[in-house]
Image (cartoon, rainbow, N blue to C red):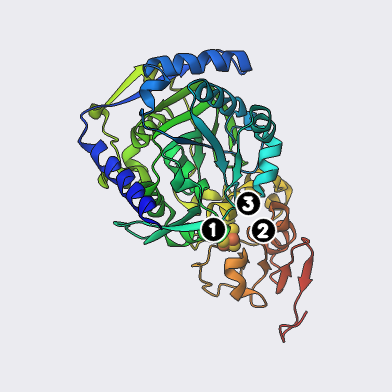
Amino acid sequence: MNDNRMKFHITRKINGIRKRSSNVSTVSIVKVAGTGKKQLKIGLEHFFETHGGLRKIIPAHTNKILIKPNLMMGEPWTTGITVNPYMVEFLVTFLKKEGLEVIVGEGAGWGCESADAFKKTGVADICDRLGIPLIDFKRGRGVHIPVPEGSLLKDVLVDEIVPECDFIFSLAKMKTHCETTVSLSMKNMKGLITEDRERLRFHLLDVNRCLIDLNRVFKPDFSIVEGIIALEGIGPLKPGKPKPLGIVAGGKDPVSVDAVCARIMGLNPADIRHLEYASLAGLGTIDKNEIEVTGESVEAVKPDLYECPPQKIEKLSPYENIKIINGNPCSNCIASLASYLHGYIDKKIIERATSNIEILIGGKARSSGTGREIAIGNCLKKYHGKLPFVSGCPPPSDAYLELIDRGLKGNFDIATVNSNCKVVFINKDNEV
Ligand code: SF4
């Protein structure tokens, strides 16, 4: 890293620490009257008014602004999985009106090409039309940026353009997440990372703590969370379900913004590991007494029920005869298995089951030799030829079908489901 970048990221970090000493952090919540483009524009204008206008948000010396939307795998925003693309359009338009230089950048979810996500969500067209650079963080050149006081990471690998930006606007979605409980502003920064391999490192080490290390260096300068159609249940993908709330929330301190959003979702921020760590690390506050909520109150927009993911991976299975052995999997395997168990599985195979099964998931899962085990995901490749094994990283949801069906009938012949979802049986000498 050159001297300027070093100076820059240290300044960012110091700014982050300073925020703790400020007395009150402001988070505003505004209602958006519908899902149309016009209503969104009115809602966003009102949102910025509650913060005294855009110019008050952005320091005078700002040169280059990065907008980081959450676009995941390019699902439509109405699924509750990705942010409303018109948020990007309006924000770019507002910023350009102020004469500011803006870029939009994102690295799509695991295994997805960002270009596909940009196209499917319509953000590619929007940026094209507005003449704004749209950067694919998974395709750019990565730079290792040191994390001086990192609890787990010594550095983070991000696209080289990220440290050149002196203001980060996070456009996150209000979502549940089976690994981090919520996916909001701080989690949204994970899309700055350039390589899937680096993302995997987060999951293998401890994603909640790695997120804090990433935010120590690249904390959003302003965060907006879209909850016009939020996501509840087992997120961040399906089987999570859309939850229309008709709101947008945001502010300068992403920790407070996320804490307020968590309360709207019916959660205590102190129970959410990465938010608790963030407040302990001095990145912001989750303390109600230190957060001023303007616009709507939390109580006014909080739904009666907001379905959250189970706190323990072991509880992902809704069936007594399917036990999950937790080996610290990443959210991709969890989402894949959850969407099979909660969506695709044929209930008849559960009803006619004659055996219990145990599903090993995540690289740290160990076989206890019960003879009723199935291992899933390439992290458990070591069990190929030793247990019924479903390959893939993550395996597609329909890949589980045959081995789980056979297992529930008491058949645990050694077999592997390959990348084409074909079951390949393996003989005693481990040869196909
Ligand atoms: S096999 Fe599953 S848990 Fe392991 S890295 Fe791949 S998706 Fe994550």
Quarter occupied by residue 124: top right
Image marks 2 and 3: residues in contact by CB distance under 8 Å: yes
Q: Amino acid at mark 3?
A: Ser
Q: Amino acid at mark 1?
A: Ile
Whether residue 267 is visible: no
Which circle, 1 or 3, is nearer the viewer?
A: 3
Sequence-wise, which precedes: disc 2 or disc 3?
3
**Cα distance between the residues tagged 1 and 3:** 13 Å
Sequence-wise, which precedes: disc 1 or disc 2?
1
The CB of the residue at mark 2 lies under 8 Å from ligand 1 = yes
302 up-or-down from 172: above or below: above
Circle 1 residue:
324
In percent of width and height, residue 226 lies at 51, 28
Q: Secondary structure at mark 2?
A: loop
Work out which residue is located at the far bottom of the displayed protein and give it: 429
Circle 3 residue:
336
Q: Nearer the viewer, residue 304 or 184?
A: 184
Q: Label for residue 395?
A: 2
